[in-house]
Image: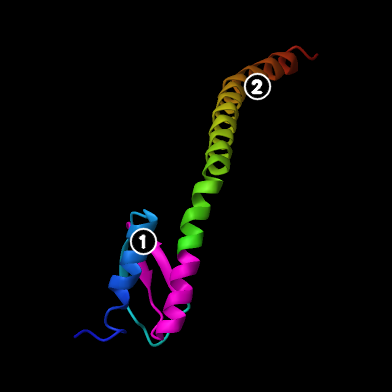
Amino acid sequence: MKSKKADLPSRMQSCLDRLGIPLKILWIPKEEGSKHGEISSNSLLIYDKDEAEAWLTFEHEIYEFKFKEVTYAYRTLVNSLIEGFEKLTYERKEKFLEFLPKIAEIIKEEKAQQP
């Protein structure tokens, strides 16, 4: 019979499956580290060694995953605005660069007309 602790990843995976969250759970206990968990490559990685801490991290990561769905519209809007401003800035820069030779030419002509 599996111990309760050894069964932790399958219990967490069961939660994800029941919630309809398309992630695979990976419990990779580490002695030291700044991260308790993260979502990477469609996997939810839990680094906590202690089971109680692992459950807290698991819960936190699920909240964060679902919250990203809420903020998706804002991220999409901001990225679209950035893209629009980049195009506008590029067009204005190109017009400026095309105008530079004309500036130099006119100044050169006027300077040449001085007595």
Q: Determine crowd level at label 1: few under 14, some 14-19, many 20+ residues with C-alpha closer than 10 A.
A: some
- 34 and 9: which is toward the camera: 9
Q: Is residue 77 above or below residue 42?
A: above
Left or right: residue 87 versus residue 113 is left
Q: Which residue is mark 2?
A: 104
- 97 and 22: which is toward the camera: 22
The reply to whether residue 49 is visible in this rendering is yes
Q: Is residue 38 magenta?
A: yes
Q: Determine crowd level at label 2: few under 14, some 14-19, many 20+ residues with C-alpha closer than 10 A.
A: few
Secondary structure type for disc 2: helix
Q: Is residue 76 above or below residue 54?
A: above
Where residue 4 sits: x, y (%)? Answer: 30, 84
The reply to whether residue 35 is visible in this rendering is no
Amino acid under label 2? Answer: Ala
Q: Which residue is mark 1?
A: 16
Q: Nearer the viewer, mark 2 or mark 1?
A: 1
Give the residue at x 58% y 42%.
74
Q: From which residue to which does the magenta span run?
A: 35-61
Amino acid under label 1? Answer: Leu
Quadrant (top left, top right, bottom left, bottom right) of the N terminus = bottom left
The answer to which image quadrant residue 103 occupies is top right
The answer to which image quadrant residue 62 occupies is bottom left
The answer to which image quadrant residue 98 occupies is top right
Q: Is residue 92 above or below residue 41?
A: above
